[in-house]
Amino acid sequence: MSLIEVQSRIKKAALKADRNSDEIKLIAVSKKQPNDRVESVVDQGHRIFGENRVQEAMQKWPSHRKKYSDIEIHIIGHLQTNKARQAMKIAQFIHSVDRSKLAQTLAKLAQETGNCPDLFIQVNTGEEPQKTGIFPTETTKFVTSCRQMDLPVCGLMCIPPINEEPALHFALLKKLAERTGLTYLSMGMSEDFETAIRFGATHVRIGSAIFGPRE
Ligand SMILES: *Cc1c(COP(=O)(O)O)cnc(C)c1O
């Protein structure tokens, strides 16, 4: 696999779904990837990257940004409140707003600094106990409370349960986004991004299909 192959598969999936591929953002998930692979994808002109740990992002991206100021970082993993300040500094998007306490912390920091990344609310579509995220039935209420705190919520994100048909979860996320008036859907990874595109994904988060297996 490679960046070019994934880009062409996204185009094909968009075409098949009667969608414009320009409205689908490819987030290259560079977590735990060796530096030479990451550099190669940057050199090929890609500028949108996903990291699940703030500390790793802080170590990896400032040097690349010196060269390419248009690099965009998306935090996609569970975020501890004590890392929120750093996350807001390094990232332009956070996909993993998964609980009230985090939303409150982000709101407080946003007021203090006058700036905030665009946010996705992570929905636990499978209602899995071991996963974080807002339950589907709580999503509308949660989005409303984020808006009341003036947080810039732009969409919803999900990670379907491993052994279930992802299409059901993508369809649910789309329905919830429509209900809450949100435009963006962050869904689809290496194994299921074509299905996610069929169900309206606007942001696909793809790691191993671009970079190969993680360390
Ligand atoms: C690691 C990760 C991905 C990418 O996974 P791949 O299967 O390598 O494409 C996407 N989303 C989240 C939240 C992740 O943690």
Image: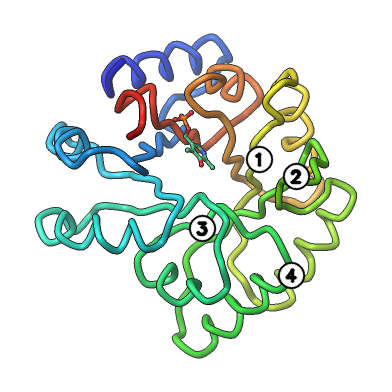
The quarter of the picture where residue 69 lies is bottom left
N-term mark: 1 or 2 = 2
Up/down of 39 relative to 119, above or below:
above
Labels 2 and 3: the sequence-earlier one: 3
How busy is the neighbourhood of tag 2: few (under 14 within 10 Å), some, or many (20 plus)?
A: many
Query: What residue does disc 4 label?
Result: 100
Tag 1–tag 4 contact (CB < 8 Å) = no
Earlier-in-chain disc, 1 versus 4: 4
Give me the residue at 37% from left, 44% from top.
31
Query: Toward the viewer: 15 or 169?
Result: 169
**At 41% across and 61% down in the image, what residue appears?**
54
In the picture, the disc for residue 158 is: 1
Q: Which residue is mark 3?
A: 94
**Label 3's element?**
strand
Image quarter in which the N terminus is found: top left
Kindly tell me whether mark 2's CB lies below 8 Å from ligand 1. no
- Please name whichever residue, 193 or 140, is drawn nearer the observer in this view of the structure: 193
Residue 208: quarter of image? top left
What's the amino acid at mark 4?
Ser
Say what secondary structure mark 4 lies in: helix
Within 10 Å of disc 4 (Cα), the crowding (few <14, some 14-19, many 20+) is: few
Distance between the Cα atoms at labels 1 and 4?
A: 17 Å
Q: Which residue is mark 2?
A: 124
Whichever of labels 2 and 4 marks the residue nearer the N terminus, that label is 4
